[in-house]
Image: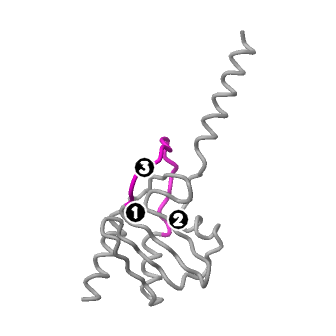
């Protein structure tokens, strides 16, 4: 009886760990893991309109990264595919790039703390005002 209980527990733990691909870490660690060291361009794309804005001034890039780099991303328990996204961000380091949406990095869905959505949305809207 104990052996079968232990085996069931072990198999259950295996399936639970297999469903959670990612680990909790800061956004900065994600893009450093992708070998993005010196960001020289940022692209923010609005998923509802398809419009996108490029940030190429180093001062603006540094400001944006300082707002989002320390945000912690925790894998969601439910990793079922979802449809659509609000904003996609691409960080460029020369020819290398790191692309993510506000709730998905690679093939893993995340929750962010603090919530990254209002930070990106406000920054994106300020960029619109600055370009008018």
Q: Are marks 1 and 2 in contact (CB under 8 Å)?
A: yes
Relative vertical location of residue 10 with respect to residue 21 in this rendering, above or below: above
Residue 18, image quadrant: top right
Q: Are marks 3 and 1 in contact (CB under 8 Å)?
A: no
Q: Are marks 2 and 3 in contact (CB under 8 Å)?
A: no
Q: Which residue is mark 3?
A: 82
As rendered, which of 5 and 72 lies closer to the eye?
5
Relative vertical location of residue 77 with respect to residue 74 in this rendering, above or below: above
Residue 55 in percent (x, y) is at 42, 84
Q: Residue at x 25, y 84 (%)?
A: 129
Query: Would residue 84 be counted in the magenta stretch?
Result: yes
Residue furthest to the right:
3
Q: On the picture, is 131 further left or further right than 1?
A: left
Residue 2 in percent (x, y) is at 72, 13
Label 1 secondary element = helix
How far apart in space, not on screen, are marks 3 and 1 (Cα)?
18 Å
Relative vertical location of residue 24 with respect to residue 63 in this rendering, above or below: above
Label 3 secondary element = loop
Q: Residue at x 60, y 35 (%)?
A: 16
In the rendered view of the protein, which quadrant contains the N terminus?
Answer: top right
Determine crowd level at label 3: few under 14, some 14-19, many 20+ residues with C-alpha closer than 10 A.
Answer: few
Q: Which residue is mark 2?
A: 27
Stretch of the chain drawn in magenta: 69-85
Q: Which residue is mark 1?
A: 116
As rendered, which of 14 and 80 lies closer to the eye?
80
Mark before the other along the chain sequence, 3 or 1: 3
Q: Main secondary structure of the magenta part?
A: loop
Determine crowd level at label 2: few under 14, some 14-19, many 20+ residues with C-alpha closer than 10 A.
Answer: some
């Amino acid at each position: 009886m104990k052996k079968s209980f232990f085996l069931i527990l072990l198999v259950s733990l295996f399936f639970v760990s297999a469903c959670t691909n990612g680990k909790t870490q800061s956004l900065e660690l994600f893009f450093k893991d992708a070998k993005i060291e010196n960001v020289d361009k940022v692209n923010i794309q609005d998923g509802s309109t398809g419009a996108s804005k490029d940030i190429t001034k180093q001062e603006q890039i540094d400001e944006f990264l300082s707002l989002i780099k320390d945000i912690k991303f925790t894998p969601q328990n439910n990793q079922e595919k979802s449809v659509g996204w609000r904003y996609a961000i691409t960080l460029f380091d020369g020819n290398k790039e790191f692309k993510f949406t506000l709730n998905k990095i690679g093939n893993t869905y995340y929750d962010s703390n603090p919530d990254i959505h209002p930070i990106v949305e406000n920054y994106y809207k300020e960029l619109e005002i600055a370009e008018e």
